[in-house]
Image (tube, helix red, strand yellow):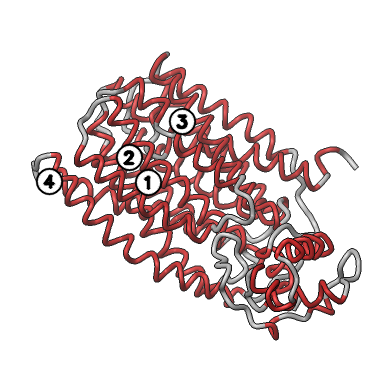
C-alpha cells in the first residue's frame, strides 16, 4: 500500500488540497484583497463584481449536492471546479473587458462546487474523532495562506497577488489528484433524519454570520487607512482563536465558549463605538471581533463534520451549511450598507449595528438548545449535566479492547446518567480521583478521549 493510500495520509492530503483551494477563494473570489487590488488598479467599480461573486458562491454551494453523490464524482467536481476557476482568473492579468463580470461569476460558482464537494472528503478521509481538528486545520492553514497572498497583492503588486492565488490552485489540484477515487463506506441512516438538524444549523450559521457581514461594511471601512496593519493582522486573531479551540482539553466546556464568543462580539462593537480609529484601537476591535468569528466558525464547521455520519449525501449537507454562511455575510453586508448610507456619525452607526448584533445573538441560545437536543453527542454541544437516558445505549453490544471491570461498569452507568465525577464518587463512596482513574480506563477501553466521544460511540452502536 502506497503512502497516500493510508487513511491518515489521505486526511493530510485532503486538508492540504482544500486549504490551498480555500485560500484562493478567500484571497480572490470572496471579497478578497487580491480582487479589490485588481479592481482598484484598473479603476473598476467593485460593487457589481463583489455582489456577483458572492451570489455565484451561494448558488454553487447550495446546489452542488443535488448532482454530486459519490466520492468519484466529488473528486472530479473539485478538480474541474479548480480548473475552471483557474482559467477564468487569467483575463484579470490584463486590461478590463466586459467579460470580467461573467468570468468572475463562473469562477466563483465553479470554486463553490469544489468547496462543497470537499464535504465528501471530510467524511471519508477523516476519522470521526479527528473531524474537529481537520476543520480547524483547514481554516488555520487557508487563512495563513490568505494573509501571505494578501501581503503580496498589497506590498508587491496586484499581479503578484493574483499569481500567488493561482499557484495555490495548481498546488491544491496536485494534492487532490493524489487522493483515491473509491473507499469503503458505511451506509448511513435515511436523509430524512437530518432534515430538521440541517434546517436548525442553517439558521444558526446564517444568524451568526450576519455579524460578519456587518463587520465588512461598518468596521472595516473605518480602518481602511491602516493598510499595512490590516493586510496582515486582520485574520491573526481568527487564527489564534482556532488554534486555542483546536487544542482545548476535553474537560473545558465548549458549550460555555459559545457564549463567551457572543460576549466578545458585543464587546467588539462597544469598543468600536467608544474608541478612536488609530492602530491600537484597530488591534482591540479586530482582536475581539475576529477572535469571536474563529470561535463561531469552528463551532459550526465541527457540527457539520459530526452530522456527516448521518447522511449518504455529505456534499449536500456540507454545501448547504456553508451556503448559510455566505447568505449571512450577504444579508449582513446589505444591512451594513443601509446603515452607513444614512450619513450618520460613526457613533450612531455603531449603536445601530450593535442593536442588530444583540437581536441576532438573542436568537442563538434557542437555536443552540435545539441543536443540543438534536445532536446530544457533539463535543461542542455537550453540557456536562445534560441527561442522556441509559436505555438509549446497548453497552453489552459495543466491543471494547478489554472487558470492563465490575466497578468500571458501575462508573459507566452513572456517567451515562449524566452525573459529574463528584456525584459518581458520592454515589459509590469512593474518591473523586478514583472516579477519574476509572473514567480514563473506560475511555481507553472504548478508544475514546472524552465523555462526549464515549456517548457518541455508544449512540452509534445502539
Q: Nearer the viewer, mark 4 or mark 2?
A: 4
Q: Nearer the viewer, residue 83 or 170?
A: 170
The reply to whether callout 3 and callout 1 are in contact (CB within 8 Å) is: no
The reply to whether callout 3 and callout 4 are in contact (CB within 8 Å) is: no
The reply to whether callout 1 and callout 4 are in contact (CB within 8 Å) is: no
Q: CA distance from mark 4 to mark 2?
A: 27 Å
Q: CA distance from mark 3 to mark 4?
A: 40 Å
Q: CA distance from mark 1 to mark 2?
A: 6 Å
Q: Which residue carries the number 2 mark?
A: 50
Along the polypeptide, which appears first: circle 4 or circle 2? 2
Disc 3: CA contacts within 10 A as few (<14), some (14-19) or many (>=20): many
Tell me which residue sits at (35%, 24%) in the image. 37
Q: Secondary structure at mark 3?
A: helix
The reply to whether callout 2 and callout 3 are in contact (CB within 8 Å) is: no
Q: Which residue carries the number 4 mark?
A: 348
Q: CA distance from mark 1 to mark 4?
A: 28 Å
Q: Is residue 270 left or right of residue 238?
A: left
The reply to whether callout 1 and callout 2 are in contact (CB within 8 Å) is: yes
Q: CA distance from mark 3 to mark 1?
A: 16 Å
Q: Secondary structure at mark 4?
A: helix
- Residue 100, relative to residue 214: is it above or below? above
The reply to whether callout 4 and callout 2 are in contact (CB within 8 Å) is: no
| Residue 232, x across and y down, in percent | 42, 25
Q: Which residue carries the number 1 mark?
A: 54
| Residue 462, x across and y down, in percent | 74, 79
Disc 2: CA contacts within 10 A as few (<14), some (14-19) or many (>=20): some
Q: CA distance from mark 2 to mark 3?
A: 14 Å
Q: Which residue carries the number 3 mark?
A: 89
Along the polypeptide, which appears first: circle 1 or circle 4? 1
Amino acid at each position: 500500500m502506497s503512502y497516500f493510500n493510508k487513511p491518515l495520509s489521505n486526511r493530510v492530503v485532503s486538508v492540504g488540497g482544500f486549504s490551498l483551494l480555500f485560500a484562493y477563494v478567500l484571497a480572490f473570489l470572496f471579497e478578497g484583497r487580491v480582487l479589490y487590488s485588481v479592481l482598484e488598479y484598473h479603476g473598476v467599480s467593485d460593487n457589481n463584481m463583489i455582489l456577483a461573486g458572492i451570489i455565484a458562491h451561494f448558488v454553487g454551494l447550495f446546489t452542488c449536492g443535488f448532482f454530486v453523490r459519490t466520492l468519484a464524482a466529488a473528486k472530479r467536481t473539485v478538480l474541474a471546479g479548480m480548473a475552471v476557476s483557474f482559467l477564468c482568473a487569467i483575463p484579470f492579468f490584463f486590461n478590463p473587458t466586459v467579460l470580467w463580470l461573467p468570468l468572475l461569476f463562473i469562477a466563483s460558482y465553479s470554486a463553490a462546487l469544489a468547496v462543497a464537494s470537499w464535504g465528501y472528503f471530510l467524511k471519508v478521509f477523516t476519522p470521526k474523532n479527528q473531524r474537529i481538528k481537520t476543520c480547524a486545520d483547514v481554516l488555520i492553514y487557508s487563512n495563513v495562506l490568505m494573509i501571505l497572498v494578501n501581503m503580496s497583492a498589497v506590498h508587491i503588486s496586484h499581479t503578484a497577488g493574483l499569481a500567488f492565488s493561482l499557484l495555490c490552485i495548481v498546488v491544491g489540484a496536485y494534492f487532490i489528484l493524489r487522493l483515491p477515487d473509491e473507499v469503503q463506506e458505511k451506509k448511513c441512516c435515511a436523509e430524512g433524519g437530518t432534515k430538521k438538524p440541517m434546517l436548525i444549523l442553517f439558521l444558526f450559521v446564517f444568524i451568526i454570520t450576519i455579524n460578519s457581514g456587518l463587520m465588512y461594511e461598518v468596521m472595516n471601512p473605518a480602518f481602511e487607512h491602516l493598510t499595512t496593519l490590516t493586510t496582515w493582522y486582520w485574520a491573526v486573531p481568527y487564527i489564534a482563536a482556532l488554534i486555542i479551540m483546536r487544542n482545548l482539553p476535553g474537560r473545558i466546556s465548549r458549550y460555555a465558549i459559545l457564549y463567551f464568543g457572543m460576549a466578545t462580539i458585543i464587546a467588539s462593537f462597544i469598543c468600536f463605538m467608544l474608541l478612536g480609529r488609530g492602530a491600537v484601537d484597530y488591534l482591540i476591535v479586530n482582536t475581539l471581533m475576529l477572535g469571536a468569528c474563529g470561535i463561531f466558525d469552528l463551532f459550526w464547521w465541527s457540527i457539520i463534520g459530526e452530522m456527516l455520519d448521518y447522511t449518504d449525501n455529505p456534499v449536500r449537507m456540507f454545501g448547504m451549511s456553508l451556503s448559510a454562511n455566505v447568505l449571512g455575510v450577504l444579508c449582513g453586508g446589505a444591512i451594513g450598507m443601509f446603515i452607513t448610507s444614512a450619513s450618520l456619525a460613526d457613533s450612531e452607526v455603531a449603536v445601530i449595528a450593535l442593536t442588530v448584533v444583540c437581536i441576532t445573538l438573542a436568537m442563538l441560545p434557542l437555536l443552540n438548545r435545539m441543536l443540543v437536543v438534536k445532536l446530544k453527542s457533539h463535543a461542542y454541544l455537550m453540557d456536562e449535566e445534560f441527561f442522556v437516558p441509559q436505555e438509549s445505549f446497548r453497552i453489552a453490544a459495543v466491543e471494547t479492547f478489554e472487558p470492563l471491570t465490575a466497578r468500571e461498569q458501575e462508573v459507566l452507568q452513572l456517567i451515562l446518567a449524566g452525573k459529574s465525577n463528584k456525584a459518581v464518587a458520592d454515589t459509590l463512596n469512593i474518591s473523586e480521583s478514583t472516579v477519574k482513574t476509572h473514567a480514563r480506563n473506560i475511555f481507553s477501553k472504548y478508544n475514546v478521549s472524552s465523555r462526549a466521544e464515549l456517548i457518541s460511540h455508544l449512540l452509534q452502536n445502539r
